[in-house]
Amino acid sequence: MRAVIIRGVSDEFEVDVCLPCQFIWLDTNETMQLPVLPHSTETADTLSPEAKQALALLKVQSMADNARREREADDFLKPFRMKHSLLAHLLEVIVKIFLRR
């Protein structure tokens, strides 16, 4: 962990940064000290065409990465779903046989 000084709303405070996992750890109430950035739509209008293209490419890449992760998760879970489905079908058959007696 490395301590980093952040300029807050009223004063400066220290946050802990984990270098291996790249997380920022905030103590109690430190989130209240974080400066609030105004949300502005004007930023997109002031970007150069190259910057807009780079942002669009990053968004497309992010969407592709998310879709790939979802496919990988589905592929990982598919055998479990099949087993569950087969088990449910087998139990249904057993119950039907049992009720016929």
Image (cartoon, rainbow, N blue to C red):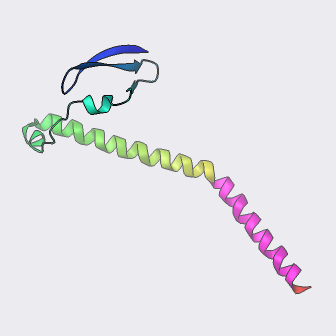
- Please say if 25 is above or below 37: above
Tell me where residue 37 appears, x and y as whole percent.
17, 35
* Quadrant that contains the C terminus: bottom right
Tell me where residue 41 appears, x and y as whole percent.
12, 45
Q: How many marks on residues?
A: 0
- Please say if 53 is above or below 89: above
* Quadrant that contains the N terminus: top left
Question: What secondary structure predominates along the stretch shown in magenta?
Answer: helix
Magenta span contains residue 83:
yes
Q: Is residue 24 left or right of residue 94?
A: left
**Quadrant of the image occupied by residue 27:** top left
Tell me where residue 29 appears, x and y as whole percent.
33, 31
Tell me where residue 78 appears, x and y as whole percent.
63, 54
Question: Residue at the right extreme?
Answer: 101
Question: Residue at the top extreme?
Answer: 2
**Quadrant of the image occupied by residue 80:** bottom right
Magenta span contains residue 53:
no
User: What residue is at 84 percent from the left and 74 percent from the top?
Assistant: 94
- Please say if 4 is above or below 30: above
**Quadrant of the image occupied by residue 13:** top left
User: What residue is at 79 percent from the left and 69 percent from the top?
Assistant: 90
Of 38 and 15, which appears nearest the observer?
A: 15
Q: Which residues are magenta?
A: 78-99
